[in-house]
Image (cartoon, rainbow, N blue to C red):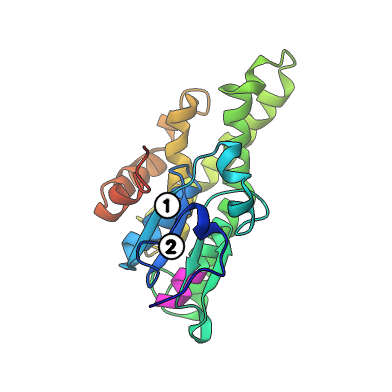
């Protein structure tokens, strides 16, 4: 039987099936990247709900897995050379799982490079900018009287949405074939609805992106991943 006792996180979130991949997450745009990828790739896994409260993400057990106190994180008992591997950062997890399985990362080196560039586009641009937009439009930042922060993130979000929309012209998926880049990007587009920012960003005018998100949400693995781990 696989022994994961070396990972302190298992003291708070015990593994019922330590021989399969352990997922520690919460269904946010970043969190669902991991669960959707696991579902799409058919990797057996055990989900653990880690809420965004300080009692969870800043607990000593979770910090032992991710010192940056962010979900998602994983433990793969069958890591490189057969040794268990702990990993955090959603983009790193997507790349690891894709390379481990050979799925959703392209068939050639050129394909992989193109998928990776769009994954980095989400990690470095789309995700952070839409996240800040949500903060300044819906959450605590909305109380700030100075309009410049909101305007900055509204305008940058519009620019990035236009980039996505243009890239999708004439194709169903962001890098050609369905890939981890789509798993990274689409949940953030979906977040516009949660933030209440579809109208101010002109979402409806981005016809390619609208159709893209609809295609993404129709996938059975996506539907399962969006609600995993299940909230209490």
- Left/right placement of residue 182 relative to residue 144 reads left
Residue 184 screen position, x and y as percent: 48, 53
Residue 157 screen position, x and y as percent: 58, 36
Residue at point 45% right, 69% down? 97
Badge 2 marks a residue whose secondary structure is strand
Instruction: Using a 10 Å C-alpha cutoff, classify the residue at mark 2 as few (fewer than 14 neighbours), some (14 to 19) or many (20 or more).
Output: many
Mark closest to the chain's N terminus, 1 or 2: 2
> In the displayed image of the protein, which residue is found farthest to the top?
145
Residue 137 screen position, x and y as percent: 59, 23
The reply to whether dot 1 and dot 2 touch (C-beta < 8 Å) is yes
Eyeballing the image, is 70 above or below 39?
Answer: above
Q: Which SS type dominates the magenta stretch?
A: helix
Judging by the rendered image, the residue that carries numbered circle 1 is: 48
What is the C-alpha distance between the residues marked 1 and 2? 7 Å
Residue at point 41% right, 61% down? 15
Residue 100 within the segment the image draws in magenta: yes
Q: Quadrant of the C terminus?
A: top left
Judging by the rendered image, the residue that carries numbered circle 2 is: 22
Eyeballing the image, is 209 above or below 11?
Answer: above
First to last magenta residue range = 96-102
């Amino acid at each position: 039987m696989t022994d994961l006792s070396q990972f302190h996180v298992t003291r708070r979130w015990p593994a019922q099936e330590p021989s399969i991949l352990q997922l520690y997450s919460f269904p946010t745009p970043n969190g669902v990247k991991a669960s959707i990828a696991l579902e799409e790739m058919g990797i057996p896994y055990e989900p653990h709900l880690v809420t965004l409260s300080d009692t969870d993400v800043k607990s000593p057990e979770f910090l032992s897995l991710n010192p940056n106190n962010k979900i998602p994180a994983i433990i793969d008992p069958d890591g490189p050379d057969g040794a268990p591997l702990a990993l955090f950062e959603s983009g790193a997890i997507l790349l690891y799982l894709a390379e481990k399985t050979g799925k959703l990362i392209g068939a050639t080196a050129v394909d992989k490079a193109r998928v990776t560039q769009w994954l980095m586009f989400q990690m470095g641009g789309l995700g952070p900018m839409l996240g800040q937009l949500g903060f300044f439009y819906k959450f605590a930042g909305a109380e700030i009287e100075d309009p410049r922060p909101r305007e900055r993130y509204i305008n940058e979000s519009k620019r990035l949405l236009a980039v996505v929309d243009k890239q999708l012209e004439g194709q169903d998926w962001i890098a050609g074939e369905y890939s981890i880049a789509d798993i990274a990007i689409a949940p953030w587009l979906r977040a516009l609805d949660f933030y209440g920012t579809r109208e101010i960003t002109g979402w409806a005018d981005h016809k390619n992106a609208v159709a893209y998100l609809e295609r993404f949400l129709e996938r059975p693995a996506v539907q399962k991943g969006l609600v995993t781990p299940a909230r209490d």
